[in-house]
Amino acid sequence: MMPRRREGASWVQDLWHVRDPDTGRRVRSKAYGRGSRWRGNIIVEGRPRTKAFARRIDADEWVKNVSASLVSGQYVHERAGDVLVRDVMDKFIAGVDVKHSTRLAYKSAIKAQITPRWGSVRVADVTPSAVRAWLVDMQRGDPDAETKRGRQGLSTGSARKTGRILSMALDVAVQDRLIRENPMRHVRLPRESEARHGMSLTSDQLHALADAMPTRGDRTLTLTLGYTGLRWGEAVGLQVRSVDLDRRRVHVRRTYSEAGGSIREETPKSHEARWVPFPPFLVTLLREQIEGKSPDDDVFTSAQGGPLRGTNWLPRVLRPALERTGVPDAAQRTIHDLRHTYSTLAIHAGANVKQLQKALGHADAGITLNQYSDVFEDDYAELGDRMEPRAYSVHSAEVET
């Protein structure tokens, strides 16, 4: 009698023998001596899943493993892995929740690096060894490639980021039960490139830079960046309503993201709004900057009234002003260095890690400490000098009494 077809029901069938309905004895079947003798059977999602084996022990083991995977929720149909990697990438990019600029970067890496190698490969055929070889090839480059970047190969950091994108997509395949395990769990990605250390300015250099700016608006923007630590997109995305002159703070509620030639309004990084205090001298400059504007207007705009583009402001405004000021390595400076300048000035002014984390909009204080540990270390080294006058005065008072 055929076992009841309840979910998870399993049995092993001898294909070479059947039971005679009249005598009840086992007799040879028409398939006797041909093909595999044993077939494992298990009911999954109301349908029988089967696989034939030459040995019964193998059929028993297969049924056992499938049953265990059903119980643990890790069951993957053997044909599910036939889905191509390109289809997995499409599903991944459609559902990933990232900023517009990050999405464009993902799409670029998928088009240039992932699809050419993996697009037509079954997701079940992606193996750790093949991924390792691919990561090495990406960095080595191809002498016959059409582009210069293709001939030179990717940097270690770019190869690492591309590998992470593939890994995230394969995580989606695991979640959709196309594969049981992400093969990249067994792959060590290239080491992360050494982060560029921000080059901060002193307070005197920052004000000299502001004075070298071509317009009053550029001057105010420079000082706002240097004394609030806002990211570029957050600064140029500031609206008049977000500037509180009475309490001397700016409210960061949105940012402009520049990618693919377009500018989009988005939420701040980590999707959290925050407010940042600024020093009193900025009140007059910001009041002049917003005078005559409506609450929804941008505080800083281009000459045409549109959003400022960092890709234009850096080479056309910031770096020439740095050169006129005589700041070293002007050609290597970035807008983000003004954020590093703020952090350095804030730490020397007595800001602790939590205060700086809040001002910079970091999701975790560990990020702040990792990025500015050298500045905190320098400030800590000066602690004894800062304490000396007070320690001496207290001792003197005790002696006099």
Image (cartoon, rainbow, N blue to C red):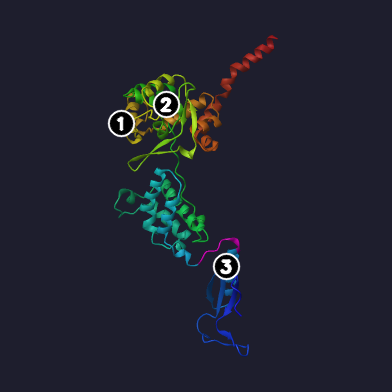
Q: Which residue is label 3 attached to?
A: 66
Segment colored magenta: 71-77
Along the viewing direction, whichever of 342 and 269 lies nearer the viewer: 269
**Whole-percent x and y of residue 205?**
40, 23
Amino acid identity at mark 1 = Arg
Main SS class of the magenta portion in the image: loop
Inter-mark Cα distance, 3 to 1? 64 Å
Q: Secondary structure at mark 2?
A: helix
**Whole-percent x and y of residue 108?**
37, 49
Q: Which residue is label 1 attached to?
A: 316
**Which badge, 3 or 1, comes first in the chain's sequence?**
3
**Which badge, 1 or 2, comes first in the chain's sequence?**
2
**Whole-percent x and y of residue 56?**
59, 77
Q: Which residue is label 2 attached to?
A: 224
For marks 1 and 2, give the one nearer the viewer.
2
The tag on residue 357 is: none
**Which badge, 3 or 2, comes first in the chain's sequence?**
3
Amino acid identity at mark 2 = Thr
